[in-house]
Amino acid sequence: VRLENELRQALANEEWQLYFQPQVDQDGRCIGVEGLLRWQHPERGLVMPGVFIPLLESTELINPVGDWVLEAACQQLAQWAHQPGFAELSVAVNVSPLQFRQVDFVNKVESILQRTGAPSHKLKLEVTESLFVEERDDAREKMLQLKQQGVRFALDDYGTGYSSLAYLAHLPLDQLKIDQSFVQQVIDSKANAAIVESTIALAQSLSLEIVAEGVERDDQQAWLLAHGCRAYQGFLYGKAMPLNVLEMWLRHEH
Ligand code: G
Ligand code: G
Ligand code: MN
Ligand code: NA
């Protein structure tokens, strides 16, 4: 209860910060970022989402906080749109199934895009397979409406949920993100390697972009590249960082 009250307080005081983790191509060039939420607590310091996202979801506070995240991502996109070296970056944010369930979710995203002036085709919404367990048709309908505005969709944590090929082919996705648990074992486990290989093949046959998450070592990237995956995210390139650190990182990476 105490933490829940503090979360309400945090919402009122806007104690949130959006950190950004880079996503790079095979030459190490940054192609986009994933926004990851942090809670700057007045006494506890920086609180990680593993601690508070589940609580936000169980109290439905995830909706106003999710609005804040979308707004922050779109503001960033609008700001970068006119800066050389930044204008090509996409910004991905995680969207909880509860946010998707809101009847006005599509309207909310549209009005945030309009208000901020963000280029909609640079906004990527990351959804997980859990979204499609119960309300698949409703979710698909909302995705289609947002896609008409140019918004793009990534399936996050791919391989950890209940993926069936039948529904994957049926959804308006743009990108698959291979879960870090597979990527980190790709060299050491033949079984994981087989899963990653078949995921890459699946993405290619469905014309989906593929991003490997959790890349920590050069040999993992080399393996992924050799098997046709050309976009990566992980500690090898950079952790999630505050905006000013990211902008410094972007200026000095090449
Ligand atoms: O940032 P970190 O690597 O600790 O993220 C841990 C988890 O929290 C990840 O599963 C991530 O998807 C989730 N997460 C981070 N930011 C957000 C957010 O803004 N909204 C939602 N729904 N989940 C988030
Ligand atoms: O579930 P989602 O993919 O949205 O969450 C991303 C989470 O993965 C964040 O908590 C982020 O900090 C973490 N992460 C990103 N790259 C790496 C990595 O290379 N290694 C590990 N262990 N975690 C990572
Ligand atoms: Mn994610
Ligand atoms: Na993930």
Image (tube, rainbow, N blue to C red):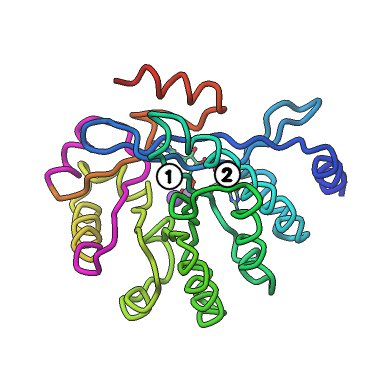
Report the amino acid beneath label 1: Ser
Residue marked by disc 1: 90
208 falls in the magenta region: yes
In this view, the residue in front, 218 or 207, is 207
Q: Considering the numbered disc 2 on the image, is that residue within a helix, a strand or a loop?
A: helix
**How far separated are the C-alphas under marks 2 and 1?**
10 Å
Q: Which residues are magenta?
A: 203-226
Marker disc for residue 127: none
Q: Position of residue 101 (x, y in %)?
A: 65, 71
Say if 18 sits above or below 97 in the image.
above
Residue marked by disc 2: 73
Rendered residue at 40%/29% (across/down): 84
Q: Position of residue 197 (x, y in %)?
A: 19, 57
Q: Position of residue 39 (x, y in %)?
A: 70, 36
Find residue 226 and report its image quarter: top left
In this view, the residue in front, 43 or 123, is 123
Rendered residue at 52%/67% (across/down): 146
Rendered residue at 41%/35% (across/down): 22
* Crowding at mark 1 (Cα within 10 Å: few <14, some 14-19, many 20+): many
In this view, the residue in front, 233 or 254, is 254
Give the mark nearer the N terminus: 2 vs 1. 2
Q: Considering the numbered disc 1 on the image, is that residue within a helix, a strand or a loop?
A: strand
Say if 26 sits above or below 66 in the image.
above
